[in-house]
Image (spheres, rainbow, N blue to C red):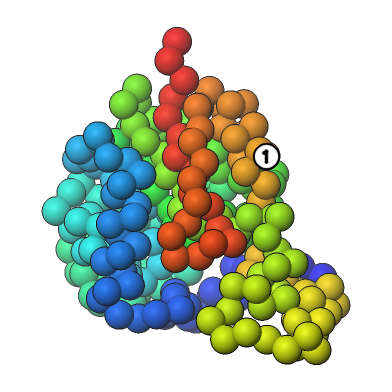
Amino acid sequence: MKTDWLSYWAGKADGGHPWHTPEYYLGQAQEFRLLYSGLDPRSVLEFGCGAGELYAYMGFDALDYLGVDASASMLAEFRSRYPTARTVQADATRFCRPETTYDLIFSNQMLQYLDLPAVSAHFANVRRMMAGHSVFLCGCIPHRAMRKLFYSGEFDEVPRTRLQKLGGVARWLLRPDYVGYWHDPRSVSALAAKYGMTSGIYGCMYFPYRFHAVMRLTPA
């Protein structure tokens, strides 16, 4: 049984991040900025912008910004924090404004709510909103090869007993996956190539079971 993620986020006003501290958000922002170093973005399109937790830490409040999220309640929270920010409620797999290009197209922990066909549709739309210098950054994607290790507790700060590890794996096998969809970096790179993009895959500093994908248009 799969989780209906659109219904899951309906009514929520919190992104569910593990730590709600300025240090965590600043650290995440610094990591992401390293991934697109060399790009000085003036315009940003953020998918899965949620309640705007990273908005100011990323410096997006100083840029031509558009945030996209499927959850009306999350966007309401975003707008209460940043009333002047431009946001729109839309499905990431359908949103496309091909008449506009963006320097940076960004998402954090969003691809986990899309299966591979949905990721493909998302990439196809993003490709139409990229210019030659654009960077497309998908942050913190769950790494499929790490799934069993994650559910057995190998990345926990406090070690689990053998019984607890087995229980974690059993939960993953018998119940809906609460993380969402786990992706193979090779599959993400293959989709990027399908739509004329070159990809770089990088490890995640905060979450060793996740990876980042940084994509640019393949030179003609």
Give the answer, above or below, for where 18 lies relative to 106: below
Identified at 33% across, 72% down, the residue is 24
Mark 1: few, some, or many residues within 10 Å (few <14, many ≥20)?
Answer: few
Q: Quadrant of residue 205?
A: bottom left
7 sits to left or right of 107 = right
Taking depth in this image into account, of 6 and 47 the one nearest to the observer is 47
Left/right placement of residue 180 relative to residue 105 reads right
Q: Which residue is mark 1?
A: 187
Q: Is residue 78 visible?
A: no
Quadrant in which residue 163 is drawn? bottom right
| Extreme residue toward the left, this view | 62
| Element marked by disc 1 | helix
Dot 1 amino acid type:
Ser
Please state if 23 lies on the left or on the right of 6 as rendered.
Answer: left
- Across and down, in percent, residue 186 comes to 66, 38
Q: Is residue 91 above or below residue 12?
A: above
Q: Quadrant of the N terminus?
A: bottom right
Q: Residue 104 location, x and y as percent?
A: 32, 41
Which x, y percent locates residue 84?
A: 17, 63
Q: Position of residue 85 (x, y in %)?
A: 22, 61
